[in-house]
Every structure is written in C-alpha cells, then in structure tokens.
Image: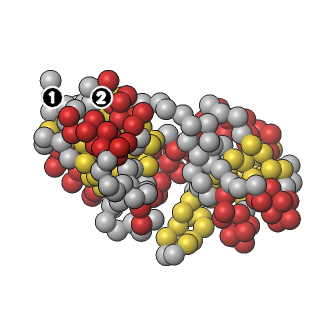
Amino acid sequence: MSKALLAAVVAHCDKILRTKEVGDYDGAANGLQVENHGTVRRIAAAVDASPATVKLAVAARADLLIVHHGLFWNVRQPWTGTNYELFRLLVENNLAVYSSHLPLDFHPNLGNNVILCAALGLKNLRPFLLKEGQYYGLQSRAGVSRSVLVSRVQRATGEKVLIIPGGRNRCERIGVITGGAGDFLQKAAEEGVDTFITGEGRHWTYALAEELGLNVLYGGHYATETFGVKALAAHLSKKFRVPWTFLDHPTGL
C-alpha cells in the first residue's frame, strides 16, 4: 500500500490553503491538531472532529482525519473524562487530525464557497462581504427565480432549504457564504445582493430579512460545508497516492 509522510501532507496543505495567512476565530487552531507516527496510508474527511467521527475514522482504518471544524473551539482542559477518552482514541489508533476552517472556506478551487457556487450554476464570481480585511464569500449576477434557486440548493446539499422570502421572486444578485453566516444579513444587504445563501441563522434574522427586502436561503450549516473537506481529501489522495473516504455524520443543523 502506498504511503506518504505526514509532514509532507501537512506542509502541502498549509501552503495551498495559506493556513498561516488567513485570519480566523481564536478557537479554530487551523493546521495539524494531532500528530500520528509520521505516515499516512488512508485519509478520512469529515465536517466535524468529534468522538463520533473519530470512531468512524478508526473503523475506516484511516490514519489522517481532515476536518473543517476542529477539536479546539472550546477549552479542552483538563484531559479527563470525555476529553481523555477522545485523545486516548486518537493516540491508540495512530490517527492524526488536520483542521481547516476559514482557509478552506476561502480557497479558490477547493473551498466550500466556490464549489457550492459551481453546484448552483453561478458564474462570473466576484468577492463578497469584506470583513476585517478579507472576503468571506462570493457573489454572482444571475437572473433566476427564487423557486428555481431553492431547488438548486436542495439538489446540491441534499437537504431541505429554509426560505425567508423577504425580497423579489426574481434573484438578480446572489451572495454565498457557507456555514453560519446568518448574522451577516445587514452587511450582505449593504453590499447590494438581493438574495443571500448561507447555512444557518438565528430567529431574529427572519424579521430583519423582511425589513431589508432580502431573500435568504438557509441550506444547513453542515450540508453547505461538506464540499471543501471532500475536495481537499480528493486532492491529497491524487497527489500523494493514498485512498480517501468521506465520513458522513450529518447534524441536521
């Protein structure tokens, strides 16, 4: 069976994803989060690093788990109880964990945003929603009915879309940010889109969308962020000649 050096895989990921350059939330801890013995023979990809996906990765006989949401969003101290059990499972099964949050969202070829846009048939993409010096999404001029766009999102994600029909039925300028960007509705409207596609939002965003005259399509946080880890794992599989598998563990959120 082919194998690759973990250090080479990590260095390649860090380079193409610009891991050190892309700003992110403090808890993201992008990059290699857990080491293994130093080689990679099989890659598993999952949206979230959790006890459930770690067990799935172990069952798949993977020694590298690629995730979008890593292990360290909240304090992982002390290493007792469930924390101990999780890290024991990782170490005893020689499973490394590499996490990429916003760097993977933003990637121009492997990113969640660009792949979802392609699945929706959106073309001539431009950067969208500038925040703290970096663009969080992509936008496109389309000219498509809201109902057709909803159908496209549902086909791309495989999940039912929550619709806030705050704007006109014909969508002319569409903004896309995968994941949990519902709090960005005001800024999205200020940037001129009439339709905003993201994963999830809070209760108050319904009334705000109506006030702003903005169509909002919530496709699910999990469902809109399966694309990047799949693309990254497939890319690594081809480059380093090791097999990969996707671990589907949907949250419904």
Horizontal and vertical percent position of residue 250: 54, 34
Amino acid type shown at disc 1: Ser
Q: How many marks?
A: 2
The answer to whether 191 is drawn above or below residue 160 in the figure is below
The residue located at (25%, 39%) in the rendering is 88
Badge 2 marks a residue whose secondary structure is helix
Residue 195 lies in quadrant = bottom right
Disc 1 is placed on an element classified as loop
Pick whichever, 74 or 249, lies toward us. Answer: 74
Whether residue 18 sits left or right of residue 127 in the image: it is: left
- Nearer to us of marks 1 and 2 is 2
Q: Residue at x 30, y 44 (%)?
A: 84
Quadrant for the N terminus, please: top left
Foreground pick, 53 / 145: 53
Q: Is residue 140 visible?
A: no
Q: Residues within 10 Å of mark 1 (few under 14, many from 20)?
A: few
Horizontal and vertical percent position of residue 185: 71, 63
Cα distance between the residues tagged 1 and 2: 19 Å
Residue at (49, 70) in percent of width and height: 134
Residues under numbered marks 1 and 2 in contact, where contact means CB atoms less than 8 Å apart: no
**In the foreground, 15 or 73:** 73
Q: Position of residue 160 (x, y in %)?
A: 70, 34
Neighbourhood count class around disc 2 (C-alpha, 10 Å): few under 14, some 14–19, many 20 upward: some
Seen as rendered, the residue at the extreme front is 81
**Residue that numbered label 2 is attached to:** 58
In the picture of the structure, the residue carrying the numbered disc 1 is 2
Given the image, on which type of amino acid does mark 2 rest? Val
The quarter of the image holding the C terminus is top right
Query: Where in the figure is residue 137, as x and y percent of width and height?
Result: 56, 59
**Mark with earlier residue (1, 2):** 1
Q: Residue at x 27, y 52 (%)?
A: 32
Please say whether residue 130 is visible from this viewpoint: yes
